[in-house]
Amino acid sequence: MVEEDKFRNKNKIVIAIDGFSSTGKSTIAKQLAKRLNYIYVDTGAMYRAVTYFALDNNLIGEDFFHSEALIENLDAINITFKFNEDLGFAEVYLNEQNIEKAIRTLKVSRYVSLVSTISEVRQKLVEQQQIMGKDKGIVMDGRDIGTVVFPEAELKVFMTATAETRAQRRYKELLERGHNLSYDEVLENVTTRDRIDSTREDSPLIKAKDAIEIDNSDLTIEEQLKTLLKLARDLA
Ligand code: DC
């Protein structure tokens, strides 16, 4: 019996992965879920989907944010994930429209932290996230998973890396996807989001007391995966 199969027979747990922007949470969470045969949920994609909706409906822009109108329209936002066999992960949909690529732009990144400060938005998304994880066997990444969404999660991880390392990674990723922008713009976005995400009133990004901190500035993906797989297997 291979190791994965043995694991499948055991108790399923909830794995919460939180941390700053561009710490590689989703890369590692996605692979971890695959190895454990767990569901993976990228909660950042959900906040990005709401931001995409706000931009698309002219509710947010350079010098305005009609937050009341966004709150009034929250019922018109239906976010779902559909597994894409070819890609090997679930893509995000807004009202049946695939927006997986459209939410990864610097434009959405610029406004998403502001949209995420709205309590009504958080309430709606947290509720949906809790339903998705009710049967456990889930790896969820975000900012408030170990503190608010699943405070009882069996395994909590808090990922960090220097702002420069994170900006460099994100810059490379965006260039590879054909976006035209400078490293400085990306660094500015990363540090601004860090500040807004950690200082907002509702569910700020903080390390849960019982979270294991991993600084991955000098770690390969394989090294991180090995550490997390061991932690998960010891707990399940
Ligand atoms: O993980 P990401 O960079 O795609 O997240 C985008 C933004 O969404 C992030 O800057 C803050 C917000 N977010 C949040 O407030 N709570 C979460 N659980 C996940 C993301």
Image (tube, helix red, strand yellow):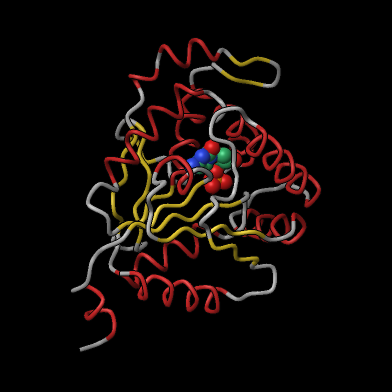
Residue 158 appears at what percent x and percent y? 56, 57
Q: Given the current orientation, which residue lies at the most extreme right position?
A: 184
Would residue 102 be visible to someone looking at this image? no
Image quadrant in which you'd find residue 11: bottom left
In the rendered view, does 72 fall on the left or right side of 65? left
* Residue in the picture at 25% in, 46% down: 134
**Above or below 113: residue 87:** below
Question: Which of 41/76 is in front?
Answer: 41
In front of the other: 111 or 148: 148
Ligand 1, seen in the image, is in the quarter at top right
Residue sitting farthest toward the bottom = 1
Observer able to see residue 207:
yes
The count of marks equals 0
Q: Quadrant of the N terminus?
A: bottom left
Residue drawn at point x = 32 percent, y = 56 percent: 138
Residue at 73% of width from left, 38% of height from top? 192
Estimate the x, y position of residue 166 in percent, counting from the top left: 69, 57
Q: Residue placed at 29% from the left, 54% from the top?
A: 83
Compare residues 100 and 202 and report the one nearer the observer. Answer: 202
**Residue 89, image x, y percentages:** 35, 58
Q: Residue 29's quadrant in the figure?
A: bottom left
Give coordinates of residue 151: x percent, y percent.
42, 46
Q: Is residue 5 left or right of residue 32?
A: left
Instruction: Give above or below for 17 relative to 74.
Output: below
Q: Quadrant of the C terminus?
A: bottom left
